[in-house]
Amino acid sequence: MEIIKKAKWLYIALSVIYLTVGIVLLIYPTQTIDAITRIIGITAIALGIYEMLKFIFRKSTDFVKVLSLFAGIFSFICGIILLINPNFIRTFLPVIIGVYIVLDSAFKLMTSIELRNAGSKVWWGVFFLALAGVIFGFIIVFNAKEISALVIRLIGVSLIIESVENIFAVISTLLKTPKITSNTVEAEYKELSTEDVPPENE
């Protein structure tokens, strides 16, 4: 039961994050992506400089350190590219997010079928929301280059749908989970204790 509670709060937290990011992307699509691009670019440059300085000061030439050096140089170059050309990630990011939404929604479709087989009365809510998520995901993937701003707004809509999917999944799971109360546990404990007591000899 404790695991179910933790999973419930994790899904709720993810839903809040998805909902917030979805609304921001819906209202400020270009500005949000540009800000994310700059943050990623600056982070990549900082990591690249760190790896290069670490290699220089440690003066080590073993394979792992050399590999880290090349990774740092690659990270530094990618960071510069992102800062100079933010349009790159504006096209590339929708594809990644679209694929993620398709895969995650496909998993939700399987979950809805399992809920139906388990006798849940609200399985159809999870099913149709997941189906909408799959459709939006494919729209994002196949239209990333042509309509970047619209795609980013669609990402926002998809993330909002994703948050509602998660909430529906949590509600459906909780409705199918038997409630274990302290009274139930106490009653079962007393029953077991009674069974363990040997009968008195007359």
Image (cartoon, helix red, strand yellow):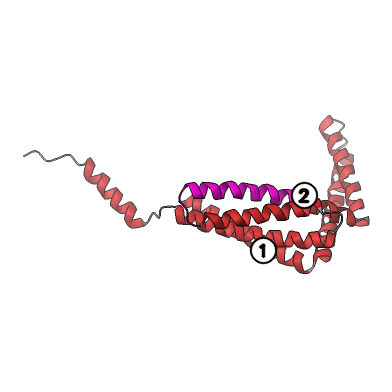
Q: CA distance from mark 2 to mark 1?
A: 18 Å
The stretch of residues the image draws in magenta is 98-121
Q: Is residue 6 left or right of residue 54?
A: left
Question: Which residue is more in the foreground, 41 or 117?
Answer: 117
In the picture of the structure, the residue carrying the numbered disc 2 is: 96
Q: Give the residue at mark 1.
A: 19
Residue 10 seen from this side: no
Categorize mark 2 by other alpha carbons within 10 Å: few (<14), some (14-19), many (20+): some
Q: What's the residue type where badge 2 is placed? A: Ile
Q: Is residue 107 magenta?
A: yes
Q: Give residue 181's quadrant in the image.
A: bottom left
Return the mark for residue 181. Answer: none
Residue at the location (83% across, 51% down)? Answer: 92
Front residue of this view, candidates 33 and 110: 110
Tell me the element at label 2: helix
Residue most toward the top?
Answer: 62
Label 1 crowd bin: few (<14), some (14–19), many (20+), radius 10 Å? many
Amino acid type, label 1? Leu
Residue furthest to the left:
202
Cβ atoms under marks 2 and 1 closer than 8 Å: no
Image: 63 above or below 72: above
Whole-percent x and y of residue 53? 88, 44
Residue furthest toward the bottom? Answer: 27
On the image, the x and y values in percent for residue 132 come to 66, 56
